[in-house]
Image (cartoon, coloured by chain):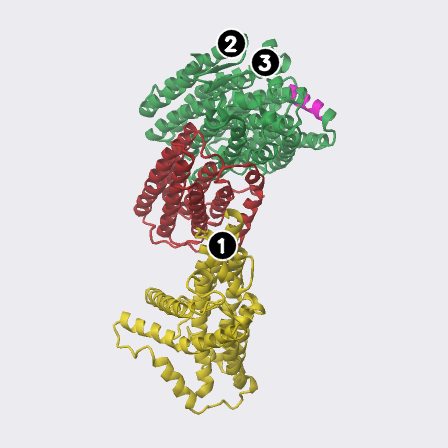
Chain colours: A yellow, B green, C red
């Protein structure tokens, strides 16, 4: 039991990530429809989309190389892997001993790298444009992301995600400006990384504005299904990463099998709240010009750095 | 009582002039106010001379040999400037350069400025010293832009922003000083009183005071006009009305230097080292050199003399930094004679530019033919300011040079070089203005002669023979600043 | 209120003041700047009041009220009226290279932290850690005055700098003696009137409040 329990949790978590991600996206879309006074397709529409795409045939471009075919699996795999090291319902994950926050950022980077390569592989104009934009966003977002997460690491004296979540959970309730700054920075980065408004718009195929969609424009069938699914997981993972780092209360600690249902309910509630927040942000803001993204992510970097500095200066 | 009169008269005069400053008799009120202040300051000086340093107003004011001589100087120069400005401003008014409200403003702010400087000198509280320095800036800012020409507005803005920022640094220094003092005195005003601080300066935390001195140096150094914080100074001097240039150059810079020296004494006491002195020496020497080279390039007459002020403030700062009885004596004397000489030069320069309706030196010619008194005044003033005997500047520079050769021989060549360049530059520029043919656009002018002559006479006396009461005074001040 | 909690609230306020200082540095719109400035004043005033409460120093309440009236209401209102009268409320400042400015700002914060290190070690006050933030606010105000080219924004930078000084006094020494604080407040008020007059003078002589026009006075070669 003692040996099997963490593995069980791990398996459970992977299932939650796989199945929860489309549900969350569905929830966000539904809320958005309601807010904009449209009829929604219900929260389960993403499942239908994915299953439909999975059974469809693939149309490959003539000059597509193996990279193009390999990329969806790499992206999907890397994202799923990332999902298995973030403490979502319990901090008791076997993988956290080997994979810390830096590995997590690297996994996301691998996924992005292959998406960008695939975008350029076909040789269409949109793919290349999307890739270059994505890389620009990434080059700015990644340092900010590391900075923000390192602030939490400083507070908890560890880079292990489980340990970080645990420390924040155990710590006495304190007003910590450093964590507040890190959270603000993290929100900005998460918006940029998951391609939401105001940085990118997941629902548009307008050639001048799209970033992520431009790269995956040529995909079809099960490739597209995997890519889309990975994208949904990314949103889910960033949300739960934020939760784990900044609001971990409710996540089960080691050997607390009884806590798992509670943790699950807490997770659903928190994710629902995050979805609501995303919708509120997206309906209030307009998408910004691509050149303003630099400033947007610059502010994220600034906030993250301020968080780190205020840890030293004020705490 | 004398102290209250010194401060009160100028404040009351400022209030009165704020309402009647545009009347015909306003200049007379201005002169009368300054004269009364001067008389009171003489009285105050006598009190200090016979009874020694005094505290007044619940230790709020403090008068010793150092600040009382500067107060008398301030009151004296403000009086002669008021005399000069009567003729000068009438001319400006007649030529439509200033309106009624401008005149009112000018007179009121002139007196307020004098009040601020006297308060800065006489207060015992380091915080109030800062406040009155800021007040002195604020009261002159709008005087610099009195003519409302684009360059005057620009100069005033620069003055406002740079001095505002600079003096803000001094406030930070004051906070740090108070922090150090609080550990000795505890909470309350006692920790900011100069008399208390100077007694326990060796108990103050040296690291904090060294840090504070950096901020004081930047803050008050900006107001002294030390390079590289001097940018506002030539602009403000050249664009404002000439009486204001005279008091800015002759008085405000002195008061700022006074504040800096007061702080230096505390820092030296706390750190037991000569660090602050070295900083001041370097700033002073750089100011002398940069100003001397800048003198060569000037085209505007008031701007040139503004650079000369930077140079002389550099000399005084250098000497205070050098320390030791001779250098400090020389610095004190230098503050006095520079202030007298420079203001009298500005008086003549003001008339010279009025005669030619321009401040451009290439267009000012033949002053001696147009108005011999203005011409000779300028010539003698320049002879005095470059440090030729028998005027006072020679004495003070000689003293400083002697001390520098003894204590800082490596600095002396630069010091001498700076003086030599300034000498050459000023003579080269002034000769054609004084001599030569008078151009046909030169106007005749009723100049205010008395202030110039009074200043010249005092300078000459100081050069030939230092009255015993003055030297005694300086010796007391030197002991205070050790 | 527990001293520990008060110290925590104070450091949060310090962090917010630092954040507003950066906000001023990068905000383009004039009204936006005014709002951020007013917020900064508010945080400053609350922080002063809290320090006054925990240290039992009642003269700090006066400073807090002074800050509140002057920095949160009076000065923003004066500026608001001036901006409205001068009809520049729609102006957007074109700034080059906000990211670089931010990086310089961060460097300044680190610099201030190092500069105030000796004082932090000596001090026993609960507010000692906020002194670095105070100095950083001063430096950022200075940076803002350097990078901005409009009269109004320079003034806001100047006032933010004063805020930093005020905060420094509170955090290093629980405030200066009252007579000094009152005097400083008076000076700021006078300065406010002077820059008000200035805006009109600049406006009438240059037809704009853009300081780029002011480049006449230079050393000519």
Task: Please provide percent x and percent y for residue B187.
Answer: 47, 28
Q: Does the segment drawn in magenta span residue B403?
A: yes
| Front-most of residues B455 and C12 | C12
For residue B442, say whether it is visible.
no
Residue C43 position (above or below residue B469): below
Q: Residues within 10 Å of mark 1 (few under 14, many from 20)?
A: many
Q: Chain of mark 2?
A: B
Q: Nearer the viewer, residue A263 or C180?
A: A263
Q: CA distance from mark 1 to mark 3?
A: 58 Å
Q: Secondary structure at mark 1?
A: helix
Letter of the chain that mark 3 sits on in the rendering: B
Task: Say yes or no: labels 1 and 3 on the same chain.
Answer: no
Q: Which residue matches tag 1?
A: A307
Dots 1, 2 in contact, CB < 8 A? no
Q: Secondary structure at mark 3?
A: helix
**Mark 3 highlights which residue?**
B473
Q: Report how far apart the C-alphas of labels 1 and 2 lie in the structure.
A: 62 Å
Location of residue B468 by image quarter: top right
* Main secondary structure of the magenta stretch: helix
Q: Position of residue C1 (x, y in %)?
A: 39, 41
- Would residue B428 be found to the left or right of residue B86 on screen? right
- The residue lying at 57 percent from left, 22 percent from top is B198
Q: Residue at x 43, y 23 (%)?
A: B115
**Image position of C138 with respect to B187: above or below:** below
> Which range is magenta?
B394-404
Residue behind mark 2: B46
- Pick whichever of labels 3 and 2 is earlier in the sequence: 2
Crowding around mark 3 (Cα neighbors within 10 Å: few <14, some 14 to 19, many 20+) is many
State whether discs 1 and 2 lie on one chain: no
Which residue is more in the foreground, B410 or A63?
A: A63
Query: Would you say residue B119 sits in the magenta stretch?
Result: no
* Residue B222 horizontal/vertical position (percent): 54, 35
């Amino acid at each position: 039991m003692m040996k099997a329990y963490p593995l069980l949790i791990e398996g459970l978590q992977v299932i939650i990530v796989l199945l929860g991600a489309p549900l969350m996206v569905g929830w966000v879309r539904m809320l958005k429809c309601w807010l904009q006074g449209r009829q929604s397709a219900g929260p389960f529409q993403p499942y239908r989309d994915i299953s439909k795409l999975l059974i469809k045939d693939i149309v490959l471009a003539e000059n597509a190389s193996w990279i193009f075919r390999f990329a969806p699996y790499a992206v999907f795999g890397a994202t799923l892997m990332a999902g298995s090291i973030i403490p979502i319902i319990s901090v008791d994950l076997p993988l956290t001993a080997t994979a810390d926050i830096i590995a997590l950022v690297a996994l996301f980077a691998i996924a992005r790298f292959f998406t960008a390569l695939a975008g350029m592989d076909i040789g269409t104009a949109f793919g290349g444009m999307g890739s270059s934009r994505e890389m620009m966003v990434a080059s700015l977002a990644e340092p900010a992301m590391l900075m923000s997460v390192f602030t939490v690491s400083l507070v908890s004296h560890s880079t292990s995600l489980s340990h970080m979540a645990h420390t924040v959970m155990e710590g006495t309730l304190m007003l910590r400006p450093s964590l507040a700054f890190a959270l603000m920075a993290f929100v900005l980065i998460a918006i940029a990384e998951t391609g939401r408004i105001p940085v990118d718009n997941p629902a548009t195929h307008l050639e001048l504005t799209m970033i992520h969609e431009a790269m995956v424009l040529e995909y079809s069938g099960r490739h597209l299904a995997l890519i889309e699914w990975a994208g949904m997981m990314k949103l889910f993972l960033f949300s739960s990463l934020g939760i784990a780092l900044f609001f971990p209360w409710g996540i089960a600690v080691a050997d607390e099998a009884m806590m798992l249902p509670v943790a699950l309910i807490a997770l659903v509630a928190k994710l629902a709240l995050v979805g609501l927040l995303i919708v509120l942000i997206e309906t209030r803001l307009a998408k910004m010009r691509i050149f303003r993204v630099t400033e947007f992510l610059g502010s994220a970097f600034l906030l993250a750095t301020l968080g780190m500095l205020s840890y030293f200066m004020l705490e | 009582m004398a102290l209250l009169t010194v401060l009160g008269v100028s404040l009351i005069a400022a209030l009165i002039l704020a309402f009647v400053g545009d009347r015909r008799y306003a200049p007379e009120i201005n002169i009368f106010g300054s004269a009364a202040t001067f008389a009171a300051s003489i009285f105050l000086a006598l009190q200090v001379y016979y009874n020694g340093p005094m505290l007044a107003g619940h230790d709020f004011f403090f008068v010793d040999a150092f600040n009382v001589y500067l107060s008398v100087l301030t009151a004296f120069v403000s009086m002669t400037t008021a005399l000069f400005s009567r003729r000068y401003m009438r001319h400006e008014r007649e030529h439509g350069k200033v309106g009624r409200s401008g005149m009112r403003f000018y007179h009121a702010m002139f007196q307020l400025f004098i009040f601020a400087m006297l308060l800065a000198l006489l207060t015992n509280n380091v915080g109030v010293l800062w406040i009155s320095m800021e007040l002195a800036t604020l009261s002159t800012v709008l005087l610099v832009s009195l003519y409302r020409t684009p360059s005057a507005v620009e100069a005033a803005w620069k003055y406002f922003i740079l001095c505002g920022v600079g003096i803000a640094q001094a406030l930070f220094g004051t906070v740090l000083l108070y922090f150090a003092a609080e550990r000795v005195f505890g909470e309350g005003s006692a920790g900011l009183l100069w008399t208390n601080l100077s007694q326990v300066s060796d108990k103050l935390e040296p690291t904090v005071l060294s840090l504070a001195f950096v901020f004081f140096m930047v803050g008050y150094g900006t107001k002294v006009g030390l390079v590289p914080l001097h940018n506002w100074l030539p602009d403000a001097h050249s664009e404002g009305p000439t009486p204001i240039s005279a008091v800015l150059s002759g008085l405000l810079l002195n008061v700022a230097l006074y504040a800096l020296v007061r702080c230096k004494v505390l820092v030296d006491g706390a750190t037991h080292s000569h660090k602050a002195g070295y900083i001041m020496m370097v700033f002073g020497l750089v100011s002398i050199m940069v100003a001397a080279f800048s003198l060569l390039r000037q085209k505007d007459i008031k701007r040139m003399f503004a650079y000369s002020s930077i140079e002389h403030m550099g000399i005084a700062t250098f000497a205070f930094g050098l320390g030791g009885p001779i250098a400090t004596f020389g610095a004190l004397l230098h503050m006095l004679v520079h202030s007298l000489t420079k203001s009298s030069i500005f008086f003549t320069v003001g008339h010279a530019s009025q005669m030619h309706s321009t401040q451009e030196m290439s267009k000012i010619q033949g002053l001696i033919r147009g108005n011999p008194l203005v011409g000779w005044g300028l010539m003698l003033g320049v002879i005095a300011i470059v440090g030729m005997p028998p005027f006072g500047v020679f004495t003070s520079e000689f003293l400083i040079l002697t001390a520098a050769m003894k204590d800082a021989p490596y600095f002396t060549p630069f010091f001498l070089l700076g003086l030599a360049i300034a000498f050459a530059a000023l003579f080269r520029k002034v000769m054609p203005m004084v001599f030569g043919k008078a151009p046909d656009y030169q106007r005749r002018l009723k100049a205010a002669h008395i202030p110039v002559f009074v200043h010249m006479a005092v300078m000459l006396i100081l050069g030939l023979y230092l009255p015993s009461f003055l030297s005694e005074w300086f010796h007391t001040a030197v002991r205070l600043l050790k | 209120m527990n001293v520990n909690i008060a110290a925590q609230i104070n450091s949060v306020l310090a962090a917010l003041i630092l954040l507003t200082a950066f906000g001023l540095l990068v905000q383009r719109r004039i009204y936006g700047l005014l709002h951020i400035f007013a917020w900064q004043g508010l945080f400053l005033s609350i922080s002063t009041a809290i320090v006054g409460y925990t240290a039992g120093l009642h003269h700090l309440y006066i400073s807090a009220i002074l800050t509140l009236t002057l920095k949160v209401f009076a000065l923003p209102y004066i500026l608001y009226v001036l901006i409205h009268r001068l009809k520049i409320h729609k102006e957007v400042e074109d700034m080059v290279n906000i990211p670089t400015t931010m990086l310089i700002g961060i460097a300044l914060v680190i610099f201030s932290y190092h500069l105030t290190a000796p004082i932090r070690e000596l001090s026993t006050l609960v507010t000692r850690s906020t002194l670095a933030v105070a100095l950083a606010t001063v430096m950022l105000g200075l940076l803002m005055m350097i990078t901005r080219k409009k009269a109004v924004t320079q003034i806001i930078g100047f006032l933010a700098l004063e805020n930093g000084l005020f905060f420094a006094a509170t955090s290093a020494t629980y405030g200066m003696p009252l007579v000094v604080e009152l005097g400083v407040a008076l000076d700021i008020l006078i300065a406010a009137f002077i820059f008000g007059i200035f805006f009109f003078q600049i406006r009438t002589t240059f037809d704009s409040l853009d300081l780029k026009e002011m480049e006449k006075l230079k050393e000519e070669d």
